[in-house]
Amino acid sequence: MSKDELNVDSPVYPKHVGIIMDGNGRWATKRGLPRTAGHYEGIKAAKRVTTEASRLGIPFLTYYVFSTENWRRPDQEVSYLMDLFSSRIFSEIDYYKRIDARLLCRGNLQALSRNAQEAIAATVDATASHQRITVTLALNYGGQDEIVRSVNRWLSSRKEASVITEQDIRDFSDLPHVPPVDLIVRAGGEKRLSNFLLWDSAYAELAFYDTLWPDWGAKDLRIACEEYAHRTRRFGGVPT
Ligand code: IPE
Ligand code: IPE
Ligand code: MG
């Protein structure tokens, strides 16, 4: 991590919040509904939280939407999710315009259907000039996979053999201009990262909540940000 990336004077609120939206399936099962109903509600929760993040002035938000490991789920659940992304997330241009949100994606998008890739590209394009908040969707995303893809991009940029640095890994990552994540919150009770933002989370603050993701809302985001505001970030140094 280079010195000027160190956020030593930690701001009151995080600049970049990563969100692990977990618990959709359990939310639905508890209500006797199919797991897919939880994913549908989960999108509504993401919209509530995004609106609040924009209102609070948090400039970067990254949602863990679908992991490289989530292909292990039943085919029917995977295809429901893919349709949901294309029909609900990538067709919300008016909403992104209203909250002045720019949409980006992070992950290996080449493995997605042509339709999904086109929908993503169109939304990224249509929102490119929006400035208040950058919302990144981590889609077919794995932290380990991103590091491997960064190294491979770096390798193909080289004419002769050399030694890779930490800065190179960052520069060749999926989104080098998005700053490292300050705070990662996880809904749904599990206390793990599940392969989310492994490189960038080196000094992230972590916060875990039992509330299942579809029940999340603006208040939960504010509570997480308040908790963050009371943490002391030292980056290996001593308190100032
Ligand atoms: C997270 O909720 C959504 C995705 C991984 C797409 P889950 O579907 O993992 O919900 P639980 O953990 O089974 O309750
Ligand atoms: C993490 O949730 C992935 C996303 C939220 C997209 P999972 O439900 O897939 O994680 P595990 O399997 O409990 O670790
Ligand atoms: Mg889960």
Image (spheres, rainbow, N blue to C red):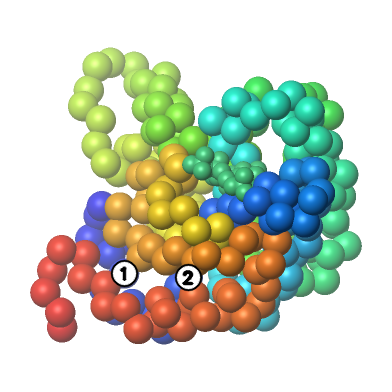
Q: Residue at x 30, y 59 (%)?
A: 203
Residue placed at 50% from the left, 66% from the top? 209
In x, y percent, where is residue 210?
Answer: 52, 65
Beta carbon at label 2 within 8 Å of ligand 2 = no
94, 66: nearer the viewer? 66
Q: Does residue 117 show up?
A: no
SS of the residue at dot 1?
A: loop
Please state the quadrant of the image where ligand 3 appears. Answer: top right
The alpha-carbon separation of the residues under discs 2 and 1 comes to 10 Å
x and y percentages locating residue 59 in the rendered image: 56, 69
Of the two numbered discs 2 and 1 on the same chain, state the one appearing first in sequence: 1
Marks 2,1: beta carbons within 8 A: yes
Rendering coords of residue 60 (x, y %): 55, 64
Q: Which residue is mark 2?
A: 15
Q: Is residue 35 left or right of residue 240?
A: right
- Quick check: 215 above or below 38? below
At label 2, the amino acid type is Lys
**Residue bearing the label numbered 1:** 7
106 sits to left or right of 119: left
> In the rendered view, would you say 10 is above or below 6?
below
User: Would you identify the image quadrant in which residue 20 lies?
Assistant: bottom right
Q: Which mark is residue 169?
A: none
- Is residue 229 shown above or below 176? below
Circle 1 Cα neighbour tier, 10 Å, few/some/many (<14 / 14–19 / ≥20) = some
